Image (cartoon, rainbow, N blue to C red):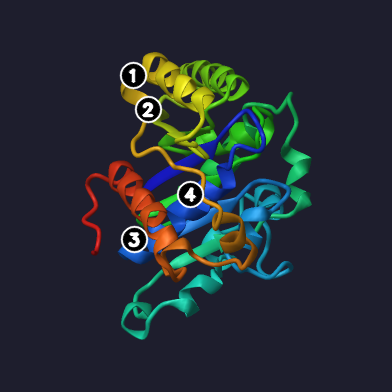
Amino acid sequence: MQILSVSSLKGGVGKTSVTMGLASAALSSGVRTLVIDLDPHADCTTGLSVARGKGREAGQLLKEYRKARISDHVVPSGWVDLLPEEKKQGAVLDVVVGSALSAAFDRPDIRPRDMKRLKTLVDRLSGYDLVLVDCPPSLSGLTRIAWAASNQVLLVAEPSLFSVAGTERTMRAIRMFSNEFAPQLTQAGVVVNRARADSTEHEYRLLEMERLYTDKLMLPVLEENPHWQQIQGAAYPVHLWPGDPVRDMAKSFDELLKQLLPAKKLNP
């Protein structure tokens, strides 16, 4: 079971969008997936078509981590109901719902033993190929809780000066955190989101990222797509959205998922 934290230090780079795109690719490919929404804004919960108030939310499970079992409180994503009939059987995309209650754990001074709360919960988990943890855009308590439970961290950046600088800081933070608290944790790579082919600044920053991140820069780069906001507003998986303009974006998420799950044979 691959446990992957999707993280960024800078808000607004599309971290939750990437989490949802990977969840859509996983659902389309038959990968049994659980999304844990640790962001107090709970946008991933909404985007995955899960009604607020369903299931015991992430903050409550962290509070009751000694006796709670995640599998008793997951909620199926509404995306499963949108699949063609021949793909519904065996399809798994579950959600641990998020809410503002999680913010109680998002302290900068979180204690090492509290960082292990999610790890204790996921250690009792089975039946999934992939667990995606949507983290808040910070290095406070909730992100550290997610990293302590994960095998890898996937960083999301956009081709801008502040995002490049923030990603460098995050990569250093991951190395330090791994050395001190989570020896199993590695960096999966950096996904570049919202790139524009007609932007000279974006072209310059992409070349800078290639130089800085070398083998950690994941391809393909996710290009800015005018339909993405509409897709998210409809709480819909990108792989089922009609029309040619989003097919390339869906294929990009397929390629990224293959790199993140190299040992898993994905359905066409």
Q: Disc 3 vs disc 2: Cβ atoms closer than 8 Å? A: no
Residue 15 occupies which quadrant of the picture? top right
Q: Residue at x 46, y 65 (%)?
A: 93
Q: CA distance from mark 3 to mark 2?
A: 24 Å
Front tag of 3 and 2:
2
Location of residue 240 in the rendering, given as x and y in whole percent from the top left corner: 43, 70
Q: CA distance from mark 4 to mark 2?
A: 19 Å
Q: Disc 1 vs disc 2: Cβ atoms closer than 8 Å? A: yes
Q: Which mark is residue 132?
A: 4
Identify which amino acid the numbered label 1 is placed on. Answer: Thr
Q: Residue at x 39, y 64 (%)?
A: 244
What residue does disc 2 label? 217
Residue 186 higher or lower than 69, as above or below = above
Front tag of 1 and 3:
1
Front tag of 4 and 2:
2
Q: CA distance from mark 1 to mark 3?
A: 29 Å
Location of residue 133 in the rendering, given as x and y in whole percent from the top left corner: 53, 46
Between disc 3 and disc 2, whose residue precedes?
3
Label 4 crowd (10 A; few <14 / some 14-19 / many >=20): many
What residue does disc 3 label? 31
Between disc 3 and disc 4, whose residue precedes?
3
